[in-house]
Image: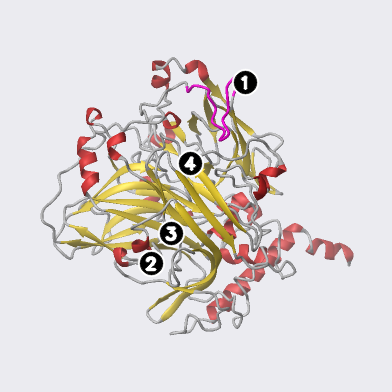
């Protein structure tokens, strides 16, 4: 019988048995639903965070907390019990790791951490106490190819143009005692230890929004489902939006309109098919990553266990807004307001539209205009858009206004119908990868009068060198075509060993890191896999310089691409985009920070499975490098902003 035993123990059959275990677990959870359950009953004694249902966005505890922020945070990374009840029923009760603000007295525990508020040219520091429990590596289902070392953590400032803190690929980069400052995501902070990350923004850092989360390879999924918090870099509108560039109207409007953080947190409980070996799209849910990592926090199959996952929504993915369920946003009739949108969590996407609540059709009574994506202004702002699209880790700033009689209701929704996807971001993105949900209700309130209309694309913001316009005409204008390097970076893919970039999974040291030369413009001319894997690059954003013609309709066809959310010239640091049979062309002008960082898929379970590689931001010979890695090589295309 030995051959049969070996067959049943093979990786393929091991995965099949593991998935059967998860199906049985889901059935056990579904059977455990009871009305009116005490959310703290049978809990392990973790702090309980109850999710507000249908509250005003401005009244949510996190909205109030985020009305103020600090460049110095002191956090405890610890388990908590998150509970959502609606209609007397528990939708879910799950134990997840969260950031607790140690500078706030008892009662300050929330579904996300406090606001990290930064200013260009200034320092920041974030102290993390690691209070994660010890995993059970002997538990049934433990699988260290999916999650491992989940009791070890670290920290990442996502979207911040900052020194990576890794001058060379040596093991000291993982040692907190050898930390050199900056956004080093290779550090390993062990259970029970406390560590402080420090950094400083450049004088030409753009305003915008980012977020922070753990980035410990092999545990990023497990930890990022709750380990998250917002980042805002101060506006400084007068510095970036000049009258001579047509920016007076939008600058004045932004200075007077209300600004709201709209922080979307994705919780992944849905059980997916097919298996990991059959799909590049496969996303392990929280139950799977918990079991694979040996978590004692969640999600036990025993309904009497303190670690059991309860609720009638525990086989679905859903979104909370500022820690609340489907809140209400007041919309003063005809008046603009700014939303800072973030999609936090380890996987998932949202396709945002505003519908008339009565007809459930896309309304023309609400206007949506784009200000920035991933903390970088488009070439011209504000840009009229028909929808918004965010994949895991992406951010955007938009301005919104609605008209209608007081009390008129609109729904901010994420749509995943085939028609909606085809009409907006491209028919070749599977609708199943977009979370369908009403995100919030928009209620029109009486106002003193309507704001002035804003002209689309009137303002040309100033730009730093790290986000300069790198399209051909501007390279010619600055005699910079000779600095252009074509670097055909390999695509995202899978092999039997896991998720890969260019046929290789993550290793440190990386024997063949991607090289990006400071003082040059680098083009990734054939970036594939962006349909299934959102590309995220640390430290430096990238510009879209060409899109597949089949998507834009430039090949003479109708195309499948609406063209108002994604445009040639836009910058991103996190990009998931429909590609059809073509490729997306990306350019970087990296600098000034030299050293090593990473690029990876921002479906973080894919990153944990190997879709991450090292990047060498190389300072050419003959140029000086400061202690913070700043290379003195000049930029081929100078910025239009002067600090």
Rendering quarter of residue 263: bottom left
Disc 1 marks which residue?
621
* Drawn side of residue 461 relative to residue 494, left or right: left
* Magenta residues, start to end: 620-635
Q: CA distance from mark 1 to mark 4?
A: 25 Å
Query: N-terminal of the two: label 3 or label 2?
Result: 3
Tag 3 secondary structure = loop
User: Picture coordinates of residue 463 (x, y %)?
Assistant: 37, 31
Query: N-terminal of the two: label 1 or label 3?
Result: 3
Tag 2 secondary structure = loop
Query: N-terminal of the two: label 1 or label 4?
Result: 4
Callout 1–callout 4 Cβ contact below 8 Å: no
User: Picture coordinates of residue 433 (x, y %)?
Assistant: 48, 54
Disc 2 marks which residue?
324
Q: CA distance from mark 4 to mark 3?
A: 19 Å
* Drawn side of residue 427 relative to residue 96, left or right: left
Disc 4 marks which residue?
200
Rendering quarter of residue 107: bottom left
């Amino acid at each position: 019988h030995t051959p049969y035993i070996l067959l049943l123990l093979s990786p393929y059959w091991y995965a099949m048995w593991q998935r059967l275990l998860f199906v049985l677990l889901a059935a056990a959870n579904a059977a455990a639903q009871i009305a009116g359950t005490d959310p703290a009953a049978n809990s392990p004694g973790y702090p309980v965070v109850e999710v507000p249902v249908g509250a005003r966005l401005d009244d949510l505890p996190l909205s109030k907390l985020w009305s103020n922020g600090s460049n110095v945070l002191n956090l405890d990374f610890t388990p908590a019990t998150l509970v959502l009840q609606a209609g007397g029923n528990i939708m879910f009760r799950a134990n997840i790791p969260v950031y607790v603000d140690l500078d706030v007295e008892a009662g300050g525990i929330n579904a996300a951490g406090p606001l990290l508020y930064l200013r260009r040219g200034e320092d920041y520091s974030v102290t993390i106490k690691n209070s994660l429990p010890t995993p059970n590596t002997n538990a049934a289902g433990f699988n260290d190819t999916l999650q491992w070392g989940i009791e070890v953590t670290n920290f990442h400032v996502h979207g911040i143009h900052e020194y990576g803190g890794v001058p060379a690929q040596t093991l000291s980069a993982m040692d907190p005692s050898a930390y050199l400052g900056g956004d080093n995501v290779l550090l390993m902070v062990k259970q029970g230890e406390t560590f402080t990350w420090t950094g400083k923004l450049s004088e030409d850092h753009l305003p915008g929004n980012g977020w922070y989360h753990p980035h410990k390879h092999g545990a990023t999924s497990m930890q990022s489902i709750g380990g998250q918090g917002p980042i805002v870099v101060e506006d400084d509108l007068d510095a970036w939006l000049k009258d001579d560039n047509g920016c007076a109207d939008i600058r004045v409007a932004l200075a007077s309109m209300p600004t709201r953080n709209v922080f979307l947190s994705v919780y992944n409980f849905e059980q997916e098919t097919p298996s990991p070996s059959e799909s590049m799209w496969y996303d392990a849910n929280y139950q799977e990553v918990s079991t694979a990592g040996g978590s004692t926090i969640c999600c036990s199959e025993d309904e009497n266990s303190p670690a059991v996952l309860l609720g009638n929504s525990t086989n679905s993915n859903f979104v909370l807004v500022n820690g609340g369920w489907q809140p209400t946003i007041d919309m003063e009739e005809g008046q603009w307001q700014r939303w800072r949108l973030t999609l936090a969590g380890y996987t998932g996407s949202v396709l945002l539209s505003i519908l008339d609540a009565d007809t459930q059709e896309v309304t023309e009574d609400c206007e949506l205009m784009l200000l920035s994506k991933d903390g970088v202004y488009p070439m011209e702002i504000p840009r009229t858009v028909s929808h918004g699209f965010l994949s895991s880790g992406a951010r955007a700033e938009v301005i919104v206004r609605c008209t209608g009689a007081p009390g008129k209701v609109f729904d901010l929704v994420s749509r995943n119908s085939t028609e909606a996807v085809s009409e907006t971001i491209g028919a070749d993105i599977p609708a199943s990868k977009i979370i369908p949900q009403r995100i919030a209700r928009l209620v029109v309130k009486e106002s003193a009068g309507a704001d002035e209309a804003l002209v689309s694309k009137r303002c040309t913001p100033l730009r730093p060198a790290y986000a300069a316009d790198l399209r051909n005409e501007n390279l010619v204008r600055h005699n910079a075509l000779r600095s252009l390097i074509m670097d055909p970076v390999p695509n995202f893919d899978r092999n039997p060993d896991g998720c890969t970039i260019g046929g290789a999974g993550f290793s440190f040291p990386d024997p063949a890191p991607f090289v990006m030369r400071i003082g040059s413009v680098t083009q990734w001319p054939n970036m594939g896999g962006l349909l299934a894997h959102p590309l995220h690059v640390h430290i430096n954003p990238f510009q879209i310089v060409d899109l597949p013609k089949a998507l834009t309709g430039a090949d003479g066809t109708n195309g499948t691409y609406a063209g108002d959310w994604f445009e040639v010239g836009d910058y991103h640091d996190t990009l998931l985009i429909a590609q059809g049979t073509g490729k997306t062309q990306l350019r970087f002008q990296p600098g000034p920070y030299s050293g090593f960082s990473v690029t990876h898929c921002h479906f973080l379970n894919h990153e944990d499975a190997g879709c991450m590689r090292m990047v060498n931001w190389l300072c050419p010979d003959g140029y000086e490098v400061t202690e913070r890695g700043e290379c003195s090589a000049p930029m081929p295309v100078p910025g239009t902003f002067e600090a």
